[in-house]
Amino acid sequence: MKKLLIISISLIIIFSGCFKKREITNLPLSPQEIEEAINYGRTKANLTFTEFTEKWTIDYGYEQGKGKVTLITPFLRIALLSKNATEKRQKIDMKVINLALKDIADKIVFKVTLYGDYPTFGRTAKFYLEYNNKKIQPLSAFMSPYSQFARDYTHISEGEVKFSNQGIPKTAKVKLFVVFIPYEKEKETTCSFEFDLSKYK
């Protein structure tokens, strides 16, 4: 009985070790890349979010039916965590980093800012990703239910859209489509943002 118990415990330890190794190797960044992202966030912590994320953003300007989209890569996500920690004069927690990387490892994530012409336009906006002539529906899409109101009567809605990255290589060109649903009888309008994933850390 004791022998059986020892064997069982040994197997649990072995499989636990294998599982941990698998989790580590599945992280989308190497330890060196994680360190680089942390340093990037620390050294550029004085920048605004817009300035900080400029290299990962496509911005079509401030106009109804347009907007800007930031590709939140694993590198950028860790850099933003580092920036936030630096601003608060805190040390970045590696547990938080690992959780953030595991969460984003199987996804393509976009931060979206859209400009519309009525308060709830963000709720009705539709998203899809196009890769290799295929339409991919989002895993999730959240936009602020009520927009911010600008002085020139333009409404601003912000949110986040997530897609599965299954079958999409890191060198792929993908296109995010945003469909604006009209308030009354106007026609739907579509805006697209093309990202070459190979160009982004």
Image (spheres, rainbow, N blue to C red):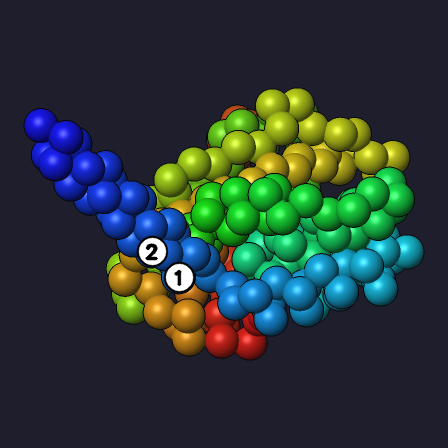
Please give the residue where the numbered disc 2 appears in the rendered image: 22
Three-letter residue code for mark 1: Thr
Q: CA distance from mark 2 to mark 1?
A: 5 Å
- Seen in the picture, residue 91 relative to 194 is either above or below; the reply is above
- Seen in the picture, residue 97 relative to 34 is either above or below; the reply is above
**At 66% from the left edge and 23% from the top edge, which residue is drawn?**
146
The answer to whether mark 2 and mark 1 are in CB contact below 8 A is yes
Specify the quadrant of the image occupied by residue 119.
top right
Location of the C terminus by quadrant is bottom right
The one nearer the camera, 145 or 1, is 1
**At 10% from the left edge and 34% from the top edge, which residue is drawn?**
4
**At 50% from the left edge and 30% from the top edge, which residue is drawn?**
124
In the picture provided, is 170 more to the left or to the right than 121? Answer: left
Query: Residue 122: x percent and y percent?
Result: 58, 32
Say few, some or many: other residues with alpha carbon within 10 Å of mark 1 (under 14 / 14 to 19 / 20 or more). Answer: few
Query: Residue 75: x percent and y percent?
Result: 60, 62
**At 64% from the left edge and 54% from the top edge, which residue is drawn?**
78
The one nearer the camera, 168 or 189, is 168
